Image (cartoon, rainbow, N blue to C red):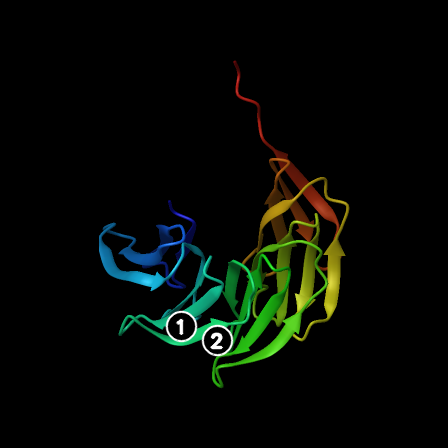
Amino acid sequence: RVNAVTFSPDGTKLAIGSGEPSRSGEVVVFETVTGKPLQTLKDLHEDAVLSLAFSPDGKRLASGAADKIAKVTDLSTGRPVNTIEGHTHHVTGVAFRADGRVLASSGADGVVLTWDMLAGERRKKIEGWTKEVTALQYIGSSNQIVTSAGDNLVRIISDDGTQVRAMANLPDYVQAVASAPGGGLIIAGGEDSALRVWDRTSGKELAVFKATPTPP
């Protein structure tokens, strides 16, 4: 089962996260032009890999897994340079800040943690969710993180823990979220089978894309 995919910043590589539940978690890095596997990180985790993110320079790959651990792997050696332990449930999301100095991770334990990549230490534990945080992403070159969660909210927070904005009153559990490259738009999707787009600055909903029923 493929649980996570992500392109390298230059688009030349595609990393895929998978694994056998409760047994192993692996990552395979492919060359996008040829589709050939370049690198296999077998048994990187002890449970299935759920989330991936390349560092801004493309030299490292962060992975989060159902074993409650996040790792940062140096792709030149294939070896983890950071093993991050702090979540008490599945690590559902990982994201590098644009300067590569901070990694944020989200968990099914309902928290977001930020990590200093130079010191290898935790910077902040951010709370405030009532259910699992399902995904997260840094917005552009800022220190702001957009998150989705099972509590029907899309939140924008700074990585010091301050809430910037919340898009509330969504009809159902939110599974995924992302920001446009420039950071001006936020998009999220969830259990109601719709994609919603917001203006990041005002929080105004700009569009809703709903699934089209399949004819019988």
Looking at the image, which residue sits at the far top?
216
Q: Is residue 159 visible?
A: no
Q: Nearer the viewer, residue 42 or 36?
A: 42
Looking at the image, which residue sits at the far bottom?
119
Q: Residue at x 74, y 60 (%)?
A: 165
Q: Is residue 80 left or right of residue 138?
A: left
Can you give x and y, in whole percent of width and height, for residue 122 in the image? 56, 79
Mark 1 is on which residue type?
Asp
- Whether the residues at callouts 2 and 1 have beta carbons within 8 Å, the answer is yes
Looking at the image, which residue sits at the far front?
22
Can you give x and y, in whole percent of width and height, for residue 65 in the image? 45, 59
Q: CA distance from mark 2 to mark 1?
A: 8 Å
Q: Which comes sooner in the sequence, label 2 or label 1?
A: 1
Residue 121, above or below 179: below
Can you give x and y, in whole percent of width and height, for residue 14 in the image? 34, 56
Q: Is residue 132 left or right of residue 54?
A: right
Residue 88, above or below 6: below
Residue 24, above or below 55: above
Label 2 Cα crowd, 10 Å radius (few <14 / some 14-19 / many 20+): some
Number of marks in the rendered image: 2
Q: Tag 2, which secondary structure?
A: loop
Mark 2 is on which residue type?
Gly
Q: Residue at x 57, y 62 (%)?
A: 106
Q: Nearer the viewer, residue 22 or 141?
A: 22
Q: Is residue 113 left or right of residue 82?
A: right
| Quarter where residue 26 is shown | bottom left
Residue under label 1? 57
Label 1 Cα crowd, 10 Å radius (few <14 / some 14-19 / many 20+): few
Q: Residue at x 67, y 75 (%)?
A: 160
| Quarter where residue 31 is shown | bottom left
Residue under label 2? 100
Can you give x and y, in whole percent of width and height, for residue 73 in the image? 36, 71
